[in-house]
Image (spheres, rainbow, N blue to C red):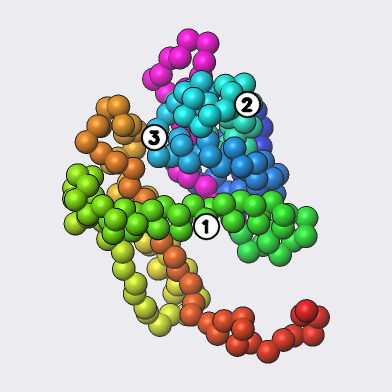
Amino acid sequence: MPDAPRTDDEDAFPEEGEQLQVDASALRGLAHPLRGRLLEELTRNGPATATILGRRLGESSGATSYHLRQLSRFGFIDAAPGRSGGRERWWRIRPGGWNMKGHEFLADPRTRAAAEAVLGRYYHQREEHFRDWRELVGERPDDPDVRRWKDAATDSLSHARMTPEEAREFAAALYGFLRDYGRRFEGRTPGDHPDTESVEVQVNIFPVLPPLRERPERDGDS
């Protein structure tokens, strides 16, 4: 897939709804931990200004403003339409999401450190969010929020025997459904939909291969 353009000119970003393909420069721009926290906050709670985000994250508005501009430069966020913050801009996650070739970045010595930082944070957040939910259900089953959501929340494990080509086709169809169905919820915020929560959908598609500990060492392996 082609790399996404990198420029301060917002008109040069991909069309609205088009998925951003992360190149090496954007990957390095995403590696800063505060930028990851800003993206997560905008994803979960909708558009916000640098001042609002700084207050939520315990950071100065100067720091959040700088890192928001960097995220915008690489195309991860853009200005939220229909919102006026006076001298401050309202930022949102750019519609369409983003995608990166993690395996390729990890294999390249020039991008390995940035890829490890970004992917490590991503997988840690996924595990932490699901663990926090399970702990809440186990420790506080009578909590009003838990009682309201426990029958709606779900997880599953399924297996199918496929070729790599079939797995790619299956993934494309699944992600297409999630993207299309999710459009009906775009733009919602805690303020205008107080009866909602940020719902996280986690999907893993991978082959069940013999683990590393069961594989013979190759020449050059330590």
Q: Is residue 130 above or below residue 34?
A: below
Residue at 77 percent across and 80 percent down: it is 221
Q: Quadrant of residue 33?
A: top right
- Say which residue label 1 marks: 123
Q: Marks 1 and 3: in contact by CB < 8 Å?
A: no
Residue at 52 percent across and 57 percent down: it is 123
Specify which label sits upstream in the sequence, 2 or 3: 3
Q: Quadrant of the N terminus?
A: bottom right
Query: In whole angstroms, how far apart are the C-alphas of marks 3 and 1?
Result: 20 Å
Task: Give the residue at the far right of this rendering.
Answer: 220
Image coords of residue 97 (percent x, y): 48, 45
Label 1: which secondary element: helix
Image side of residue 197 versus residue 116, left or right:
left
Let me know if residue 12 appears in the view: no
**Label 1 is placed on what type of residue?**
Tyr
Residue at 45 percent across and 72 percent down: it is 167
- Say which residue label 2 marks: 63
